[in-house]
Amino acid sequence: MKTIGVLGGMSWESSLDWYRMANEQVRQELGGFHSAPILLDSLDFAEIEAMQASGEWDAAGDLLASHARGLEAAGAGLVVLCTNTMHLVADRITEAISVPFLHIADSTAEAITAARLRTVGLLGTAFTMEQEFYRDRLASHGITALIPDAENRAAVHRIIYEELVQGVVTEESRRTYGDVIERLVDAGAEGIILGCTEIELLITQRDADVPVFPTTALHVAAALKAAGL
């Protein structure tokens, strides 16, 4: 297998799950003492979050591109970014390296297409829901993404940043997300994208009556396939 270069730490709560899922899948597939060949570069999320809040996307892109080059130099045969939001600067990363970069929205779109769906609800940070980079990427696959109204977007975003990135999971927040999902389904969503890696700490398929697309798990599977598992 190729070594997978992982840009993580945004937040480490979900990066931990990415790493765990990758190793569990390799062990399940190959057995014995096998584990995933991974180079993990875990950034300080406080620095990234400050850039997000102040709209310093160019600086964030330069920072992530630099770390991606470091992973390639260390021997990574492909690079992944373990956060949906920071795919806003995915082009910077792609341009900075010569090895493949696996976009998380592409692996999600492939799963949605395989399920024969075309209209889905998108949950994520306010940046992911409100800016066009993610929805445009899905649209390039023929998928329409619906987003919650302003009040519900604020609630989804708040729970991510005030709770999930801190490892806090509550039943009240699960109910809040459930209500948002129901409204998206009522608006025509045939499935729901868990478009923030931390959301998978809170929501699973049992929390929705339509198919749920967990971006972290789908990204892991795509990375392992690309690496040659």
Image: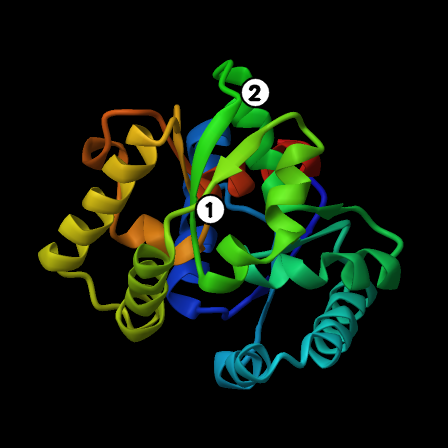
User: Residue 104 at x, y = what percent?
Assistant: 60, 45
User: Residue 129 at x, y = what percent?
Assistant: 49, 54
Residue, far top? 116
The residue at the point 27 percent across, 38 percent down is 183
118 shown above or below 103:
above
**Near-viewer residue (121 or 167):** 121
Asked whether, in this view, residue 143 is left or right of residue 17, the answer is right
State which quarter of the image contains the C terminus: top right
69 shown above or below 31:
below
Spatial separation of the CA atoms under disc 1 and disc 2: 17 Å
Which numbered circle lies on residue 216? 1
Q: Which residue is mark 2?
A: 113
Displayed quadrant of residue 227: top right
Asked whether, in this view, residue 127 is left or right of residue 134, the answer is left
| Helix, strand or loop at mark 2 | helix
User: Residue 225 at x, y = what percent?
Assistant: 63, 32
State which quarter of the image contains the N terminus: top right
Q: Amino acid at mark 2?
A: Thr
**Near-viewer residue (128 or 101):** 128
